[in-house]
Amino acid sequence: MNTLALEPIYGSHGVALAISIILILVILRFTPPTSNPSHRRSLLTLRLIAGLLLVLAIFRPTIRFSQDQVTPTAIVIAADESLSMTLSSGEGQTRAELQEAAWRQIVTELKSLQPSLSLKLMAYGEETREIQNPTSESLKSIAPTSPRTRVAGAALDAFNLAPGETISGVVMLGDGMQTGLEENGSSQVAIETLRGLGIPLWTIPMGKDSTGAATRDIAIEAAPESLKLFSGNESLVNFQVVAKGLTGIEIPIQLSWIDESGKEEVFATRTVVPTQANDNISVSVPFTVPAAGSYQLKMEAKAAANEIATSNNQQITFVDTREGGGKILYIEGSSGLEQSFLRRTLRRFPDLDLDFIWVPGDTRNTWPIDLSRELKPGVYDIYILGDLHSEALGQSQIKQLSDCVASGTGLLTLGGMHSYSAGDYQATTFSEVLPVVFDQESATSQGQPTRSQNGTYDLHQINEELLALPTQAHPIVDMGGSSIETVWRELPPLLGANHWVRAREIPGVVTLLKSEKEIPLMVVGEYGQGRVASIAFDSSWRWWRAGKNEMHRRFWRQSMLWLLSRENLDDSELIVDLDSRRIPVGSSGDFTITSSNSRDPLTVDQLKATITRNRQVLKPVDLEVKISQGKPIIKGKLPELLPGIYGLQVSGAQTIDTEQGSTITFQITDNSEELTRPEADNDFLAQLASATEAYGGRLYQPEDIDELCERIRENHTRSQNTVTTAFPLGEDPISGWILFSLFITVTTSEWILRRRWGLN
């Protein structure tokens, strides 16, 4: 559409008209000074022409050309290149083939909108990448090989694919299977971001969703790769059962040990029942750690009827167990600081399994407490008896405890207001078990020590600060350093202690700690086959509070090891650490070799590493030395192996027998999550699209692609704008120069004529 308009200077028609009138009046008023009518008319005509040219310049006649133009935009197509696209789509072809057909259809139907509508193609899996200069055959060159899929993150990447261009929508093809970790840590964060972009996201699922018996699936997930435990301790294994399409159906689970010879033994069974179509059930199974050795802990779910993929129905955790762990029962009647810090210390050690029983004083009417289960032989390796009156246990159970010690269990007794003679233990079998001689006078019938006139417990207690000093070198009191006594003198003094007459004068009884006044503070001995340690104080927590927490931990740790008869064990061994015990096919795991004996660094020449399977040597592994934090470290890399269970054995270079050395078991897996979940996650794709529902986003089935293309065409048509181009007279170079040339020609002609005719 073309129009003619006036655009006067200063934007005012009135001003332009006034200037024009004044200009014409001036021309007519000041006529040429000649009496010749012909000369007058010629000069006046030239002046009027020049004036009209100025009037045209003042009013600026403008021609406007208007036309409708479509705004150039881009549509981004995101195609899935993960391994799961090799699975069946349920339509007689793979998901990748269905995706390729969908891409070709979109290109064909939107071809008429080019070039104002451009198509961008992006491939996504664990990462995203743009396919340059896409054609209808571009997806033939995309191999579905990515081991992970970031679906929500890929949707966000698609919106950022064409910087500087206007994106009118994103079409996301794929099965919606989210198997990779999002960079922002949460798919929900990505969904909230999509909601604020103002651009529609259209998703097209490439596969059947999780409805129907054909998509039933059970998977064991989230089991730990490995555990290092001590035999005889109690432990837990936690894992998850992911069930799909099995609402209300019982799923039997069994757990079994597989030892180094391959023998399998079931030790626990469980049954879980999913309550929804897609259910994730957490399972926790307690177990007693078996004898020292290397095991596979297998968690396996029975396959459901019509379940397609069953390779994910089991998972293996590698368990390495060793002797030396200790199970401890700590019985305490005080809520003071000593028991709190002692429990905190002992629970830091993975080879010590601590159970705690608190017996408050206000439960006296229920004494003696029932410890029939806890006092059975073999249940615990060490008993710790804290500030608790003998009546809380009763004569019979104290006798049971004494029998446990006689059969080999360790016993540690602590100081306190109700310990030893203050708790009437001199009237029990403890008078023979403990390595100290009590005061012969008992406490009151109320279970409290007697009180002197000044208010202190002077019969059974020593109420003054005491500095604990070692009497001799011993594994319990050796805290390192050049001088044992110097280290102990740096510890804060104790707040007091129980009063003993003396240490028992029998073979094997040793006083380890005394005060500066020769008051015995710690005495150890033996009773039957068990070891006994008696401590008179209950304020070692002061060491921790004074910043000597390492000394606190070391003292109590060494006390436990002595009671377990482990103080002189040589734990020197080769230690092999793999970065991962489950290694995907095609990957190579890194490992390091160290020795628990740090005095003599290892060298490559001393070691030999081999891969074993079924206890047979398969191939050697090269080793190398690398420097880490200034120290040499022996490192190696596993070769590529087929799926299965293998061993990495490290031994001395001269050792050939595979029974010797240190062996760590590992698994080469081919259970890609992409391949063990046969159904598409259409719900997740719908959830992503619904985040942009306000802008037209939604999920389309593959058979509805023509409907989607029609919507894209409609949106593109609505994006057209009316573009108006104006050509004011004199503003462009051509018309400006013409107007200027005419004005110069007219005024110059007038000047020449006036000169010729002799006029001023």
Image (spheres, rainbow, N blue to C red):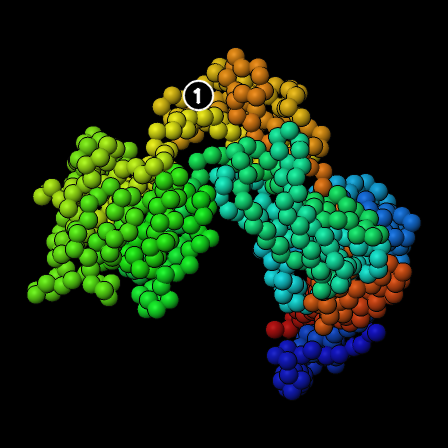
Foreground of the two, 475 or 504: 504
Q: Disc 1 residue type?
A: Leu
Residue at 84% across, 42% down? 140
**SS at mark 1 in the image:** loop
* Residue 243, horizontal then vertical, whole percent: 73, 56
Q: Which residue is mark 1?
A: 602
Regarding residue 191, the answer to whether it shows in the image is yes
Q: In the figure, 539 relative to 640: above or below?
A: below
Residue at 31% across, 60% down? 391
* Residue 104, horizontal then vertical, whole percent: 87, 51
In this rendering, position of residue 333 left or right of residue 242? left
Regarding residue 316, the answer to whether it shows in the image is no
Foreground of the two, 137 or 577: 577
* Residue 722, horizontal then vertical, whole percent: 78, 72
Number of on-image labels: 1
Pointer 1: residues within 10 angstroms few (<14), some, or many (20+)? some
